[in-house]
Amino acid sequence: MAVHSSPSPSSSEVSDTRSYVDWVRARQRRDRQHRPAITMRQCTGDGSEAANVHAQEQAWAERHAHERRLQASAIAHIRHEKAPA
């Protein structure tokens, strides 16, 4: 029974593997260091945001209602012009 040994990797393949592993570890380390700061920014809300969002929604609703009134008025005007006399 013959025993097949796997070919040993060349020095450049070992070097590439080590540099990749080093890169991955450095990236993971950097992510772990920044994660608390990112989490704090996402979890900390500004107390004034709710009022601002409500004001924006209200302004949008008023603009939308105004656009609908303008459109209805324009359609009524067109229909009045085309109405038989």
Image (spheres, rainbow, N blue to C red):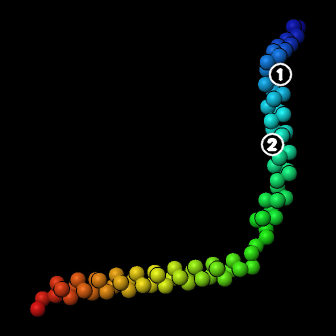
Query: Which is in the foreground here, disc 2 or disc 1?
Result: 2
The residue at the far left in this view is 85
In the displayed structure image, the side of residue 73 where residue 57 appears, left or right: right
At a point 12% along the width and 88% down the height, the residue shown is 84
Mark carried by residue 27: 2
Tell me residue 49's x, y (percent): 69, 77
| Element assignment for label 2 | helix
At a point 83% along the width and 46% down the height, the residue shown is 30
For the residue marked with disc 2, what is the amino acid? Arg
In the displayed structure image, the side of residue 63 where residue 30 appears, left or right: right
Mark 2 or 1, nearer chain start: 1
| Element assignment for label 1 | helix
Q: Is residue 7 above or below residue 82?
A: above
Quadrant containing the C terminus is: bottom left
For the residue marked with disc 1, what is the amino acid? Val
Q: Is residue 17 above or below residue 23?
A: above
Q: Is residue 24 above or below residue 52?
A: above
Residue under pointer 1 = 14
Sort mark 1 into few (<14), some (14-19) or many (20+) by Cα contacts within 10 Å.
few
Tell me residue 11's x, y (percent): 83, 16
At a point 81% along the width and 38% down the height, the residue shown is 24
Sort mark 2 into few (<14), some (14-19) or many (20+) by Cα contacts within 10 Å.
few
Q: Is residue 41 above or below residue 61?
A: above
In the displayed structure image, the side of residue 19 where residue 77 appears, left or right: left
Quadrant of residue 58 within the rendered picture: bottom right
